[in-house]
């Protein structure tokens, strides 16, 4: 719930008024459409709205910790996504991968927007594809999970972006296997990005 996110942000700022690194890693993939406590489609709520709200609320602590870094865990599945403003919450025709792709595309777009807005504050904002990893995400069968890399490997690019001197000052990029790569063409659509930013602010009560 957004109330929980706001409570977390307040607790973090009280305990840590200076923050140097924030990694937004929580995520869900759901076969059936579910709603958050606030009535949003749950993948969109957890994978996009919640980390965006937390990051925005932690701006004072991140600015105090500058040069600081924000790392958003997205997914290569963002290439399967599209921002459908007429069905943003998937009231019609819910499909797991399409909804997941939309949420992760929104995450990439928000990364680029924050990178532009916060450059002058000394806060870098990047996102990444961690790989297809053995986690509980997506309810994969056990025999498939046995073939996948473990979570330690999936964390490598996040840790690289959080700690490496090689990416100091690098912002607004999408990474895979610790290398900057180009995200989907849709993620660079400035008109859609601006409309999504405004709609996200409205949903989060930040407008």
Image (cartoon, grey):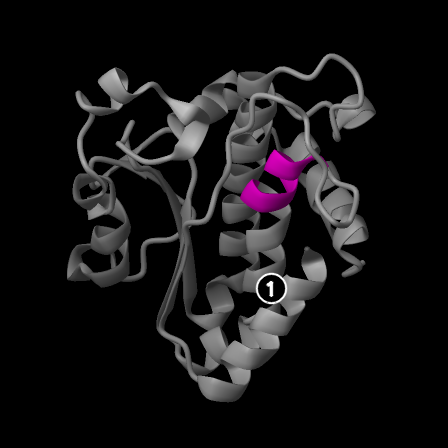
The quadrant holding residue 34 is top right
| Above or below for 207 versus 179 | below
Q: Residue at x 74, y 40 (%)?
A: 40
Give the main secondary structure, helix, strand or loop, of the magenta stretch.
helix
Tell me residue 31's x, y (percent): 56, 21
Q: Is residue 42 magenta?
A: yes
Q: Residue at x 51, y 45 (%)?
A: 112
Tell me residue 161's x, y (percent): 27, 53
SS assignment at label 1: helix
The answer to whether 144 appears left or right of 17 in the picture is left
Query: Quick one: label 1, few (<14), some, or many (20+) residues within 10 Å?
Result: some
For this rendering, which residue is in front, 145 or 153? 145
Specify whether residue 17 is in view. Answer: no
Tell me where the magenta segment starts and ends, as one range. Answer: 41-47
Q: Quadrant of the C terminus?
A: bottom right
The quadrant holding residue 144 is top left
Q: Quadrant of the N terminus?
A: bottom right
Tell me residue 162's x, y (percent): 27, 59
The answer to whether 91 appears left or right of 96 in the picture is right
| Above or below for 30 versus 125 | above
| Above or below for 30 versus 112 | above
Q: Residue at x 65, y 38 (%)?
A: 42
The answer to whether 125 appears left or right of 148 in the picture is right
């Amino acid at each position: 719930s957004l109330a929980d996110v706001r409570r977390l942000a307040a607790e973090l700022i009280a305990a840590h008024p200076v923050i140097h690194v924030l990694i937004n890693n929580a995520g869900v993939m759901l076969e059936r459409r579910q709603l958050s406590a606030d009535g949003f489609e749950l993948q969109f709520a957890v994978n996009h709205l919640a980390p965006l709200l937390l990051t925005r609320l932690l701006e004072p602590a991140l600015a105090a910790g500058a040069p600081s870094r924000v790392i958003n865990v997205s997914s290569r599945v963002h290439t399967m996504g599209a921002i459908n403003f007429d069905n943003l919450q998937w009231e019609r025709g819910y499909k797991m991968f399409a909804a997941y792709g939309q949420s992760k595309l929104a995450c990439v777009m928000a990364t680029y927007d924050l990178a532009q807005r916060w450059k002058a504050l000394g806060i870098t904002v990047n996102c990444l594809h961690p790989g297809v990893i053995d986690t509980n995400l997506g309810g994969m069968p056990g025999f498939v999970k046995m073939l996948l890399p473990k979570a330690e490997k999936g964390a490598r690019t996040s840790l690289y972006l959080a700690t490496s001197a090689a990416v100091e000052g690098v912002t607004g990029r999408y990474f895979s296997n610790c290398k900057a790569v180009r995200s989907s063409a849709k993620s660079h659509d400035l008109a859609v990005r601006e409309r999504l930013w405004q709609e996200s602010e409205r949903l989060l009560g930040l407008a």
